[in-house]
Amino acid sequence: MTSIRRLLIILLLCASSSITAQTQFDVFEASIDEIRSALEQGRASSVQLVQQYLDRIQAYDRQGPELNSIVRLNVDALDMARALDEERRRTGSRGPLHGVPIVVKDNYNTDDMPTTGGSVALANFVPSENAAQIDKLIQAGAIILAKTNLHEYAYGITSIGSLLGQTRNPYDPRRVPGGSSGGTGAAVAASFAAAGFGSDTCGSIRIPSAFNNLIGLRPSKGLSSIYGILPLSHTQDVAGPLARSAEDLAIILDAVIGYDSRDEATAIVQGASLPRFVERLGSADLAGLRIGRLQEYFEGTDANLRRSLDDALDWYQQQGAELVDVEIPDMADLIRRSGLIGHEFKPDIDQYLARFSGDENLNLDSIVSQGLYHEAVDGVLSRSNESELDEPAYQLAIAARAQLRKAIEAVIAELALDAIAYPTIKRTQVFTGEAQAGSNCSLSANSGLPALSMPVGFTGNGLPVGLELLGGFLQDAELLAIAYAYEQALTPRRAPSTTPPLESGLAPRVQPFSLSFERSSIRLWAEFEFDVLTNLFHFDIRKEPGSSGVVHAVTLVIDRDADGDAQDPIVLNLLAPDTDAAQGSHFMSAQFRDAVVDRRVYLRVFADSFPRTGVAQLLE
């Protein structure tokens, strides 16, 4: 088998939702239900699951694409897995999460590991008790495998901080994974765990979901507890899972929602019937669905996102759903006046540190005065530290939140809408180091209403696209059911090419191949390397001794037919005029990568003795 053909098999596996190796269950893209089935049938143990995820983290987080998503591993994970395997043998399973490895954003309290918020200031801060949702996961039998990176203190949307640096997007490691829960987004997309947890103050679950081809819900405020999660704004903060499928999300949500006396916002579900996410998955009646298209948020959206977004809404319409263009009166002004982060961050973090650290000298002022943070959060931390709570202004912002929610709910009621749809974010993933613009996060964050980001395809250069659905209060399960119907019909999940299945526990190697070109008096030698992990195509090309003709250009083209006659545009020029040798790297588009694997890439040489269209030779 040629090296290229072997890579074809690997990449085809990447496109599937799961993989079963010849000798054992493989965690790559495995769903929670598939994991549960493998555990129950004895095709895998929790110990084996943990080890496979650890192998993937080893292969891809600090090597290969260098995602830099994992802050620290839980050193007790294998021991926990052994204990849960033994418990399963003795007394049976606790439920669908028994023995299932999960990663959590490093602003969730874990009393056996530091909780850092991505900051060197909290590098050794071990809180006195777990976050409420961590306890629920442990009770359900889940294994907390690792803590994931975030934008420092969750105060941004590109996932960079002083403790770990920049997390990268597995779909294009040159770009950001979204934030602030970008470490979780990248890790779940790369199959470092079955699913992961994030928090969302303004987009921090939804943006990483959109940027990593995942599904994530910002729940109705109070549906689940935020106790023990490092705060950004306690009124706006919510927390919960990001997953590769709607069913996985539903399973985890059912496990972590509910009343918690330590979080007063959860009083809204005290004694009430909780949403049943798994039970409601198949309940959406698409023929009777009414979806509002929020025109203001579609305006100005990148054209390379619009096709996937419009196609998704068109699909719902084809199933019988009615699309209604909507406007929310005074929306921009109400959003501008209802943000609370600037009011709440300083008192909230000081109260959190006092409660969970036991160190009376640890507070925002001590962190800022010592400069213990990344420059990316310098401005927001300094401004927050210098501010004092303006109670009248704070109360006006609280009132504006109520007005915004009332305005949204009035539109939903008047038009009998099941959801309001708009892009999760208007811009594609920026390159690391750049500012990310285009977030539509505030409509849900400032109203307390639930919003779900669902994957709806990819841009032309292979970047994931997310559509957001906003619903009525506590209509969370209905939103997920709407997304589930789309997912079941169109299967929008596609694994990133940079983190493929392991081979005997190891990442695929770089595949070298070479080409000798000799026509008339033109002689060339080229060496290539195809690195699926970095998505780079390396080349080294030179004229051979005895090549006497004049070469004007040597290009790579993707050809659509076997004769190399009908070609797409030139991918890149390898050899410029008056140049005898060149080397470099090219970041591959999805189309180019597939063409290399399918052997549809040609070297096309332009020389004085050749026809105007050049002479082509297949790369083999």
Image: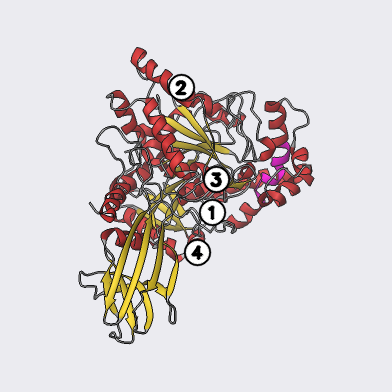
Q: Secondary structure at mark 3?
A: loop
**Residue 165 appears at what percent x and percent y?**
60, 47
3D distance between C-alphas at marks 2 and 1: 40 Å
Q: Quadrant of residue 476?
A: top left
3D distance between C-alphas at marks 4 and 1: 12 Å
Instruction: Identify the mark nearer the N-term, 2 or 3.
Output: 2
Q: Which residue is mark 1?
A: 440
Q: Which residue is mark 2?
A: 80
Residue type at tag 1? Asn
Residue type at tag 3? Ser
Look at the image and give the residue range highlighted in magenta: 337-347
Residue type at tag 4? Glu
Secondary structure character of the magenta stretch overall: helix
Instruction: Identify the mark nearer the N-term, 4 or 1.
Output: 4
3D distance between C-alphas at marks 4 and 2: 50 Å
- Circle 2 or circle 1, nearest the eye: 2
Residue 471, visible in the rendered structure = no
